[in-house]
Amino acid sequence: MKIFHLSAECYPVAKVGGLADVVGALPKYQNQAGLQAVVVMPYYDRKFTQENEFDVVFAAATLLGNRRLFFEILKEKTNKLGFELYLVRIPGLLDRTEVYSYPDEREQFIAFQLAFLDWINYTQQTPDIIHCHDHHSGLVPFLLYHSKLYTRLANVPTVFTIHNGQYHGAFGWEHLALLPEIDLTQTGLLDWAGGINPLAAAVKCCWSYTTVSPTYLRELTINSNGLEYLFYIERAKGHGIINGIDTEVWNPKTDAMIAGKFTTRLLAKGKQVNKDAICTRFGLDPEKPLYTFIGRLVIEKGADLLPEAVERSIKENPGELSFLILGSGDKDMEAALLELKDKYPGQCNVFIGYDESLAHLIYAGADFLLMPSRVEPCGLNQLYSLRYGTMPLVRSTGGLIDSVIDFGDEGGYGIRFNQVSVDDICYAIFRAKVLYQTPAKLQQLRKRMMELDFSWDRSAKEYIDLYESLNPTI
Ligand SMILES: Nc1ncnc2c1ncn2[C@@H]1O[C@H](COP(=O)(O)OP(=O)(O)O[C@H]2O[C@H](CO)[C@@H](O)[C@H](O)[C@H]2O)[C@@H](O)[C@H]1O
């Protein structure tokens, strides 16, 4: 069974957030299960592309409005990632350093999708499933079924996975000419609220859509940035499949990015070595409970509440707690956090930026991970932290509900709270502090966390079952 995954991100080629982690792992596990899963993504001028070798397997030109764009399909030579990796390179459009935020992002992602379709069409490839991820590849299902150019592929089933339903990639109808010739009687399928909405088009046209947790599937009908009704009427096509984690990359027993490797047998010592390394580097006291936040500093993640929650907790528990924040994003949030760092040296430190190795070290050495998310389709941070024996403190939403049980409940191992409020966050921090004062209990819970199984094996199988239900000939 040949599956093409289409995505803007894939770890370790180009990562901004969790989308990359999923697309860098799921195909590998699908291949181990006997599928032939490949990844197709835009070319970025980054470390991975500079340090690895590629063959040009196809070259042609496509039309983006009235622009003729020459493109190449590059294939990574060795399949070292556990799958075939194809990059779409378009000089001047898809050959830049960053993944997002260019003013012509719309053109970039439309061109990516057109080049992909032209490539498989010209080369007579017929995938068994095309699996699109997020709005960057959301026009593919529409184009496959409603553009004359691709009628050869009109029977290929499509699966669309929503990693983040807040971003739609919408643009105005005045840009319709960027698309190739389409059946104009079907333009309603592209439309939502008076614009071309790639996320909505994908949900309408795909054979099945998935969300990255079962709870998020239900939540999209009440919170999806304007698409609630669409998710309600299309709900029969929806499936919630929780993400897994790549246990080869995220493994405290083998992780080369941490200060000391460990297992459940050497848990206390192993965590302490990593905590000491962090505390030395960031000027914090290793005796105190260490709380962390890792992630994009955006409203969805509740990062706007962090400065006040941290400050209030420090004031209410003087000299008892340590905080370390790793992230980047909203400039006001960055500034507010940096102010805290200056105000409470030795109690709070902040690293503004993106640092994959540091994230591994913090997951390994921190005691508690804060996730006050307003929206969390799945969340991977809590899964990584559990694997490294770091207790997640999460707001009850989306995938956090599906993956974290409060330690006060039967079989629990984390801390949950209900409201996105400073009070709720501070109360969770306080509960964690009390728990920290009973090391034997915390130790027992850490062991329980590390023994949980969030590997991809089970979820990869759920995707395969879905593919088989859509394409019974395979
Ligand atoms: N400054 C920094 N330095 C180093 N590493 C950093 C970092 N900021 C973030 N990261 C890393 O980026 C990833 C974030 O993943 P998440 O799944 O938590 O969030 P994201 O919102 O990006 O993903 C969306 O897609 C994923 C995948 O489906 C869903 O789990 C999620 O809920 C959804 O919002 C983790 O690997 C984390 O360690």
Image (cartoon, helix red, strand yellow):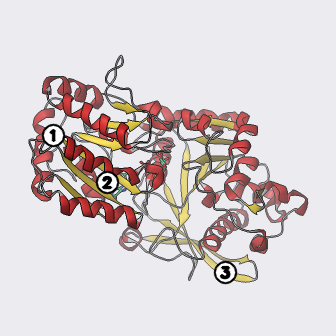
Determine which quarter of the picture holds residue 59.
bottom right
What element does badge 3 sit on?
A: strand
In front of the other: 190 or 337: 337
On residue 307, the disc is 2
Which is more foreground, mark 2 or mark 1? 2
Query: Crowding near pointer 2: few (<14 within 10 Å), some, many (20+)?
Result: many
State the residue at coordinates (51%, 43%): 377
What residue is shown with label 1?
A: 271
Residue 11, image x and y in percent?
42, 57
Residue 354 visible at all = no
* Quarter of the image with the C terminus in it: top right
Residue 215 visible at all = yes
Residue 323, image x and y in percent?
22, 49
Whether residue 335 is situated above or below residue 168 in the rendered picture: below
Query: Crowding near pointer 3: few (<14 within 10 Å), some, many (20+)?
Result: some
Which circle's residue, 2 or 1, is located before the other in the chain? 1
On residue 69, the disc is 3
**With 350 as the anchor, is 242 left or right in this view?**
right
State the residue at coordinates (43%, 51%): 21
What element does badge 1 sit on?
A: helix
Which is more foreground, mark 3 or mark 2? 2
Q: Label 1 is placed on what type of residue?
A: Lys
